[in-house]
Image: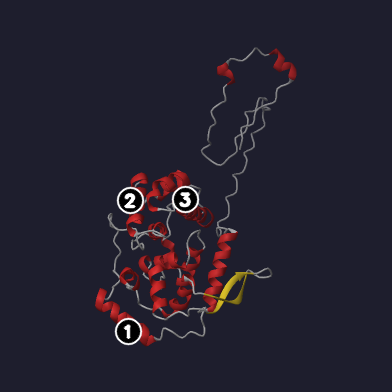
Amino acid sequence: MPAITARRTRSAAAASPPKTAAATAAPTRQTPDDDDDIKPASTSTPRKGKAKKEEPPAPQAPVGVAPLSASALKKQALYTAAREAGTPFPHWARPTPQEAQEVCDLLGSVHGVPERPKVLVDKEDAPAGCGQVPSVLDALVRTILSQNTSSKNSTAAKQSMDAVYGRANYRGVLDGGEAKLEDAIRCGGLSKNKSKAIIGVLNRIEERNVHEKGLKPGEGELSLDFLHGLSDDDAMRFLVSQDLVGPKTASCVLLFCLCRDSFAVDTHVHRITQSLGWLPPNGSVHKVVEGEDKPVRVTSTTQPPTRDQTFYHLDHRALPLFSLSPHGPSFP
């Protein structure tokens, strides 16, 4: 709250001697140690025999659910509607269980059968990649950095970020702001969009700490580890509500960090599944769009299958085809 100064009469101002430059300099603003408003000192003499009335403490803000922006609510509603609608290609039965198993066997013979580690280890030299690290927040940031770039570039961006702020120092990242983060991750590409998205995630966690834990801004740990306690759908719904986080990025966090069954569809997986005939080249697609009378509605349109539609078509099958992505670069 701005400092309050006492008013002076015109005659009093005229009688005052001219002020020196030092006297007219702006005073240093003091920050209070608590949330009480700063009030001007009283010049009146208190009446004798009358005890000073103590003001009751200000009521604490109620702890509740952190509010979501209109954009976050819309993204959550789109995910929910798409998930409830099921596959966007209801008349396309492929892949059959036999086809999926055959591909799994072939991939296993080339790359070995992947096994999830029992304990995730935070390695300093780990690539940014898909986010196979213990911290859910660190996994999400790594996956955002890996968007639309090579593993080499995203890893360089994460290493640069850690060099500037300290390893996984997300409080420092939030306090530093977007411009500083953009400069730190510039080597990874799309630094403006990615820095905005990462700061947005951190602000969202800060809001959750304030509204749901009753903490003050700047207090508490910035963490997404609470997602471990959510269902797959609730964790996905939270993640996809963030800026620059779609089904692919959220699915990677679920699969590699939360160790859930989720079918992450990156560029390679999308291309391979199309080549295998698991997606129709063109077909009737249930597209979720915003409606006027309801948050979302479902209509039909015809368009080539997108990467997100591929996720909704294949994820419910829970296919263990984790090697499709590393196999992608060698796939003709």
Density class for disc 2 (Cα within 10 Å; few <14, some 14-19, many ≥20) is many
Q: CA distance from mark 3 to mark 2?
A: 17 Å
Secondary element at image label 1: helix
Query: Which of disc 3 and disc 1 is earlier in sequence?
Result: 1
- Which quarter of the rendering shows the N terminus? top right
In the depicted structure, whether residue 203 falls above or below residue 300: above
Residue 32's spot in the image, x, y percent? 53, 36
| Res 198 → quadrant | bottom left
| Discs 3/2, front | 3
Give 122 or 295, whichever is nearer the viewer. Answer: 295
- As drawn, is 216 to the left or to the right of 323? right
| Residue of label 3 | 192
Report the residue that reaches farthest toward the front. Answer: 332
| Res 20 → quadrant | top right
Secondary element at image label 3: helix
**Image point (58%, 72%), residue name:** 288
In the depicted structure, whether residue 217 falls above or below residue 297: above
Q: Are marks 2 and 1 in contact (CB under 8 Å)?
A: no
| Residue of label 2 | 159
Q: CA distance from mark 2 to mark 1?
A: 39 Å
